[in-house]
Amino acid sequence: MIRNLGKRRPRIAKSAFVSEAAYVVGGVEIGENSSVWPGAVIRADFNPVKIGKNTHIEDNVVLHGGFTPMTIGDNVIIGHSATVHAEKVGANVLIGMGATVLHNVEIGDRCIIAGGAVVLDGMKIPSESFVAGVPAQIKGKVSQKQSVWIDESAISVYAELAKEYKDDKL
């Protein structure tokens, strides 16, 4: 379901796929070739949520523009059941399944947030960081082996799948 809220209206690129079982409300912007999968909730009622191009919001993710506007970069995958209140997510980032990213967090480019991690309020994560744990800590740089999850081929798999769903009008 895609809904306006007062004067706040979602703007969704024509090439983007948004499942009919997702809930998108308010000042949400979704970029070219991005996707929002079933059960995802994107609420931009307090502040806007801007999602870049080739970014994929998997099933049951919650994004909420809470205290500050939220910007999510290009070529991002946010894994199943993650909850994100971040202020900024850079480009080429993977946020793993079940991760929680609290308010005022800034994530640099080419980062991986491990599944189940809890990124505490206000954390600033430099580019190319691998972050894991509860509470989350920077464990080092993204390794070459890990980078397969954030390279263009991983992103393009989701883009192709989203196009197939969109073309089949699912």
Image (cartoon, rainbow, N blue to C red):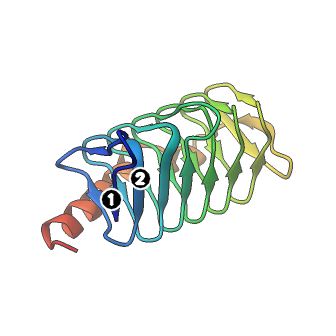
- At a point 54% along the width and 50% down the height, the residue shown is 63
Left or right: 74 with respect to 141? Answer: left
For residue 46, say whether it is visible. yes
For residue 145, say whether it is visible. no
Q: Amino acid at mark 1?
A: Ile
Q: Are marks 1 and 2 in contact (CB under 8 Å)?
A: yes
Position of 53 relative to 63 (above/below) = above
Q: Nearer the viewer, residue 19 or 9?
A: 9
Q: Position of residue 167 (x, y in %)?
A: 13, 66
Left or right: 145 with respect to 26? Answer: right
Q: Position of residue 34 (x, y in %)?
A: 32, 49
Position of 75 relative to 169 (above/below) = above
Q: Which residue is mark 1?
A: 2
- Under circle 2, the secondary element is strand
Q: For residue 7, what is the image quadrant?
A: top left
- At a point 34% along the width and 50% down the height, the residue shown is 4
